[in-house]
Image (tube, rainbow, N blue to C red):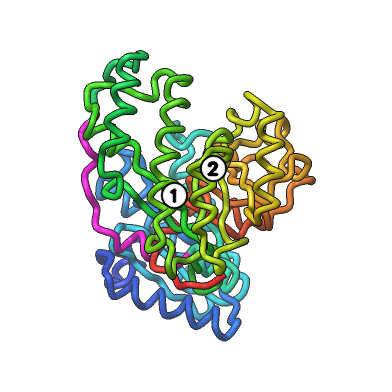
Amino acid sequence: MTAALARRDMPDEVTRQGSPEDARRLATLVRECGTAGIGRAVLLLRLSQLPEGRTRPHHLQLARDALLPLTGAARAQLFHLPNQDHVVVWRGETPALRASLDTLRHLFSDDPSFGPDPMAIASVLALPDDAALLHHVIAESLRPRTPPPPPRGAGQPLDPPTLLALERAIAQADMSRFARREPICRAGLEGFRLAWERRYLSDSELFDTILPDRAPRADLWLFRRLTRTLDRRMLSLLAATEELRGVPPFSINLNVASLLGPEFLRFDANLPAALRGQVVLNLHPEDILTDLASFCFARDFAAARGYRLLLHDVGLTQLALLPPTRLGFDCVQLRFTAPLTAEVLPPDIDPETVILGQADDTAALSWGRSQGIGLYQGRIARLPHRSGR
């Protein structure tokens, strides 16, 4: 059967625009499969990820046509999401899957924008195992599209006099308006469950407000000193008794020097008993490497007070230099990048102790799940979630 004939026979299936109703129907199916343990095969076609130049109507239609062989599989259902993504769900094995994948591979094999993998927009999944990933895809398809912000000027790096003036300004400013919370979530069959929150000061908003014509991060060493000032202000905010009443477990970013300072001691003294043992301290690799002896002292002090330690924002190469278990870390936040999908976790890293950071899309969730990682930080973890560990 030709594609044209198939479209004529199914005018409301492949050719119509995506709709929120299809997204809701798919969410219901995914939830039912997870609840009842019903096995289904899934092909996810992410046309929203097509590069510019491949999104003309005829390109989109050719990609949709590749799904036609699958619509004849047992219990096949086709869903058109509002952002041009398409999902086919069916039961059992079918040779039509290979036909669809071959068509897609041929369609995009000459496009260098896909790099070495022209199948970057197609994923073969399974329910109920990939329920969390599909819930994310559905939520992402319903999210309003906003234009990217205009590019910011580079600005001048900090110099010592400007740094001192900035530190004085931060010491006097109302920092509560820059305080933010970010969820760290555990992926499950029914979506994401809140594990803890990261509490932090939005330094980018702060710098835009106080010093918009400078680039504080341009000089690494001056910026590191500035982060100690931010640590002190964050700890001062958290030391307020009302700030910590009834809050869920949380983590904070700290320099090693800040962990040993008076502000941390005041914070520790005011920590409610219910949160003792529930607070994670995020330490940065460059800070540890700078002064290993101070780190070891701070690590032992924090452990004695019941804090958990997290090695924050590292890549696989840094894990070789800073083996988390040997250094006494309870967990590690691994930074997700596209090249990571070709790697595997080192055998000495327990995936139960890993948080996948900068997990902003389904590629991150898919790779993390393949490695046994359950905790995520990033856009996929900012979906509606439930409380609980």
Residue 2 seen in this snapshot: no
Mark closer to the chain start, 2 or 1: 2
Mark 2 residue type: Phe
Of residue 86 and residue 127, the one placed in the foreground of this image is 127
The image quadrant that residue 45 belongs to is: bottom left
Residue drawn at 30 percent across, 63 percent down: 142
Which corner quadrant holds the N terminus?
bottom left
User: Residue 281's x, y, as percent?
Assistant: 57, 48
> Pointers 2 and 1 in contact (CB under 8 A)?
yes
Is 143 situated left or right of 252 in this image? left
* Residue topped by disc 2: 336
Name the residue: 56% across, 72% down: 127
Give the residue at mark 1.
360
User: Which residue is nearer to you in this view: 221 or 93?
Assistant: 221
In this view, the residue in front, 8 or 106, is: 106
Q: Is residue 279 above or below residue 311?
A: below
Q: Please say if 141 is above or below 266.
A: below
Task: Let me know if residue 140 is in the magenta part.
Answer: yes
**Quarter of the picture holding the C terminus:** bottom right
Q: Which residues are magenta?
A: 134-150
Residue 67 image point, x, y percent: 43, 62
* Magenta segment includes 5: no
At 29% from the left and 15% from the top, the residue drawn is 156
Image height of 216 relative to 194, above or below = above
Query: Judging from the image, what secondary structure is the residue with disc 2 in?
Result: loop
